[in-house]
Amino acid sequence: MTVCIDNVQHPLIIDSGAHCSIVARNYLDNHFPNWEKQLLPTKEKNFKSASGKMTSIGTIIKEIIIPHRKGNIRLNTDFVMLDYSHIQGFLLGTDYQIMYGILQLVPTRKRKFHLIYTKFPPMTHWKSY
């Protein structure tokens, strides 16, 4: 899905298998040249994925704007920045999916998604990345 961050379009992956929201350092280097000024410390330093261990550099807070036909959806999100090059964009993990009601864990422990209108209109008034 394409979202707006700092008035520019960026890809956002909704990943129900990720326990936190993440962004790769190389993506920030290419699209947010002043990210070092926004970097905050993170509690967790080491993460595991199917492709191996990843190291956290810190946390960066970004406002995501998801265009919607009934009004844009704004999500203030903490992204853990990883020294990992395979992610091209931002990844929204279950931490914020549950917080904002995109994902609900029902009593049967099955995952239920609540993204009602997924075909978003084109964002012609925003710059492309």
Image (spheres, helix red, strand yellow):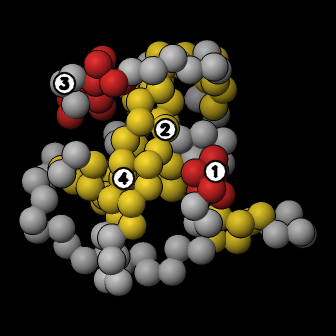
Mark 3 highlights which residue? 33
Quadrant in which the N terminus appears: bottom left
Q: Estimate the spatial distance between the alpha carbons at disc 2 and disc 1, rounded to whole Å.
A: 12 Å
Q: Which tag is nearer the camera, tag 2 or tag 3? A: 2
N-term mark: 3 or 4: 3
Q: Nearer the viewer, residue 79 or 14?
A: 79
Q: Is residue 1 above or below residue 48?
A: below
| Residues at discs 4 and 1 in contact (Cβ within 8 Å) | no
N-term mark: 2 or 4: 4
Q: Estimate the spatial distance between the alpha carbons at disc 3 and disc 4, rounded to whole Å.
A: 18 Å
Position of 82 compared to 74: left or right? Answer: right
N-term mark: 4 or 1: 4
Q: Can the viewer see residue 26 in this picture?
A: no
Mark 4 highlights which residue? 64
Mark 1 Cα shell of 10 Å, populated few (<14), some (14-19), many (≥20): many
Helix, strand or loop at mark 3 = loop
N-term mark: 2 or 1: 2
Amino acid found under the numbered disc labelled 3:
Pro
Amino acid found under the numbered disc labelled 2:
Asp
Q: Identify the disc placed on residue 78.
A: 2
Residue 41 locus on image (x, y percent)? 51, 17
Q: Is residue 56 above or below residue 101?
A: above
Determine the image quadrant of residue 74.
bottom left
Q: Estimate the spatial distance between the alpha carbons at disc 4 and disc 1, rounded to whole Å.
A: 15 Å
Helix, strand or loop at mark 1 = helix
Amino acid found under the numbered disc labelled 1:
Thr
Q: Which residue is at 82% across, 69% downward?
A: 106
Q: Estimate the spatial distance between the alpha carbons at disc 3 and disc 1, rounded to whole Å.
A: 27 Å
Q: Is residue 100 above or below residue 60?
A: below
Q: Nearer the viewer, residue 30 or 35?
A: 35
